[in-house]
Amino acid sequence: MTPRVGVITFPGSLDDKDAARAVRLAGGESVSLWHADADLHSVDAVVLPGGFSYGDYLRCGAIAKFAPVMGKLVDAANGGLPVLGICNGFQVLTESHLLPGALTRNDHLHFICRDQKLRIENNSSMWTSDFEVGQEILIPLKNGEGGYVADEVTLDELEGEGRVIARYLELNPNGSRRDIAGITNERGNVVGIMPHPEHAVEKLTGPTTDGLGFFTSLLSSLVNNGKISA
Amino acid sequence: MAIVVVDVALKPEILDPQGRAIVGALGRVGLEGVSDVRQGKQFVLNIDGDVDEAKLAQINEIAATLLSNPVIEDFTVQVRP
């Protein structure tokens, strides 16, 4: 059975179509989920896409966390449902307390858009299992509020438990503490990443196809967990 | 009618790049001796009727969950006389 991966569209989401396409290229079936519909339609995993949900009003992701679909998602994620938050989706995950810390204004105040080199630090999460630890990848980054912050205790905890999944290489583009580009929860089912793997899935449009690994990892993890038969 | 003011500010340990840019601008417009600026947000809530204890408690709860992010921000709630 083909895994069904939901992609939530909020008002102001931009990258939901790209995320859905990445899911399909990896071999999954994409399912459109709507912010106002408090139903996950029995999907096997969910992607929170990039963009500017609710115009980034108040704080990035702050209003999205109260969307009807999010109540269901938070419960499902706490129950083990795989969830990937990309960029604005990462901001929604921290605002919803599914991941620790917060994303703040880039330290240099500029919106940044570049192809960013990363090092994969953890391949035990459900979204990074197809990578090698130490593998270097190149995927697009585009954000104005991508500086990852958390208190020192939380940062030490993330490092100690191996929950930093990717780190910026060569240049820290936004002032993120300890060059953190992405993190996972304790269970490894919820991952947030600031750069955009869904924009690096085809040679025609991306700098590489390195981003596809996040989506194939999910499919492998679902098979290995027995959720989906191969 | 009552007015309740919620002020939200970044916690002292969180870098405020906007505040830092404002320090630079203040120097350029001739205000000397400003060592630091912290930029915050103010929400002015116009409330129908009186603000009793229960209403104030509700506003405090909402200030902590919606209007501010306790990971990076502190807030104060004041009933304006």
Image: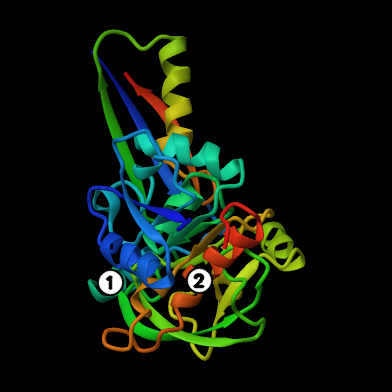
Q: Nearer the viewer, residue A181 or A10?
A: A10
Query: Which residue corresponds to the image point at 38% horizontal and 35% vertical from the top-left?
Result: A39
Q: Quadrant of residue A71?
A: top left
Query: Which residue corresponds to the image point at 48% horizontal and 35% vertical from the top-left?
Result: B64
Q: Which three-letter amino acid code belongs to the residue tagged 2?
A: Thr
Q: Quadrant of residue A112?
A: bottom left
Query: Which residue corresponds to the image point at 44% horizontal and 47% vertical from the top-left?
Result: A43
Q: Nearer the viewer, residue A137 or B27?
A: A137
Q: Nearer the viewer, residue B11 or B67?
A: B67
- Asked if A200 appears above or below A1 in the picture, the reply is below
Which of the two marks, 2 or 1, is nearer to us in this view?
2
Tag 1's secondary structure? helix
Task: Give residue B31's position: percent from left, percent from top.
Answer: 29, 68
- Chain ID at mark 2: A
Tag 2's secondary structure? helix
- Asked if A48 appears above or below A87 in the picture, the reply is above
- Quadrant containing the N terminus of chain B in the rendered view: top left
Q: Nearer the viewer, residue B56 or A145?
A: A145
Residue that carries the numbered disc 2 in the rendered image: A216
Task: Give the class, few, some or many, for how many residues have Cα within 10 Å of label 1's Cα (few <14, many ≥20).
Answer: few
Q: Quadrant of residue A79?
A: top right
User: Marks 2 and 1, how far apart in space?
Assistant: 49 Å
Query: Which residue corresponds to the image point at 58% horizontal and 67% vertical from the top-left?
Result: A220
Q: Is residue B43 visible?
A: yes
Residue that carries the numbered disc 1 in the rendered image: B25
Q: Is residue A189 left or right of residue B23?
A: right
Q: Is residue B62 left or right of residue B28?
A: right
Q: Is residue A74 left or right of residue A110?
A: right
Q: Is residue A196 visible?
A: no
Q: Which three-letter amino acid code belongs to the residue tagged 1?
A: Ala
- Asked if A227 appears above or below B47 in the picture, the reply is below
Q: How is the image coloured?
A: rainbow
